[in-house]
Image (cartoon, helix red, strand yellow):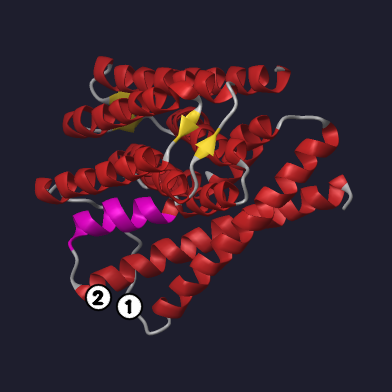
Amino acid sequence: MHIALHGLVILFCVFGLWGGAVWIVESAARIARKLGFSELVIGLTVVAFGTSAPEFAVTVGAALMGEADISVGNVIGSNIFNLGFILGGVAVVRAIATSHHMVVRDGGVLIGTTLLLVFFFRDLFLSRWEGLMLVLLLVAYLALLIRSREPVEDVPPGEFHWYEIPRFIAGVALVILSGHYLVESAVAIARAVGVSEWVIGVTIVAAGTSAPEFATSLVAVIRGRHGISAGNLIGSDIFNLLGVLGVAGFLRPMTVTPEVYGSLWVLVGMVIIVVVFLMRTGWVISRAEGAFLILVNLARWILDFLK
């Protein structure tokens, strides 16, 4: 298949991922409300998991296909993209205010999780037991969130209708199919032009699967809901590392290239920078800090392509 056609497939898949994730988030939130779940459970599970659905589909699909670099690269790249381009870009539009509790608790969990992955990948291998440990840590984190009983505001508005269930199922199917073909075309382009699959996974695929997070966070900050704008990204990053990568590693242990280790340290640096920014300016990411995050991510992309 011609490279241009593969590029077109990727473009359609990005739209499919975005649209499918929107259906998942909106329908699942309304189903949860219908069943009587709290705002906390809806916001920090359904919304965060829904916006991470593309990463889940692409990462697990790539792992099962034996494309470990695409699988791990997508998670690491998506997280760096979330904290750099998306969080930075949203902050440039409007400074993001958060809370001491969210920064200390969720920011601390994100730093700890990223450092744990650095330890797991020290031998460039993620075993099935290490993947299971990541999933169990996600369960423990969710239990902590539920016990905290902190109110969550970012849930799609609207009443429940009978078609929410089939729309949710259709959204899941659309995300899975789009993720599958996105991986196939990205790998084909990487091989055709001589660019490593790691670079494609950590940049183009990562950016495409982060589209739902970008839409959610941008709309939230424009509407003045600052906390959820940053919270959605941090929550999605935690789910990507513990849930997405954990499930992928449990289903199929993965051996990756040395570039993974370096990018993991880049992610550690990005997480620490974001937490420090929030702590030093009264739990706010300013426009200048947002611009700095964008520049750091842009520099990282350039270095990845030059490898």
The answer to whether any part of residue 229 appears in the image is no
The residue that disc 1 covers is: 160
Left or right: where 68 falls relative to 160: right
Closer to the camera in the image, 42 or 131: 131
Asked if marks 2 and 1 touch (Cβ < 8 Å), the reply is: yes
Left or right: where 148 falls relative to 239: left
Q: Which residues are magenta?
A: 38-50
Which quarter shows the C terminus? Answer: top right
- In this picture, is 19 found above or below 154? below
x and y percent of residue 302 in the render? 67, 19
Classify 10 Å Cα crowding around label 1: few (below 14), some (14-19), many (20 and above). some
Closer to the camera in the image, 243 or 290: 243
CA separation in Å, label 2 and label 1: 7 Å
Given the current orientation, which residue lies at the most extreme right position?
2
Q: Residue at x 63, y 52 (%)?
A: 14
- In this picture, is 35 found above or below 256? below
Image quadrant assignment for residue 242: top left
Image quadrant assignment for residue 161: bottom left
Q: Main secondary structure of the magenta part?
A: helix
Closer to the camera in the image, 105 or 65: 65
* Residue 34 image label: 2
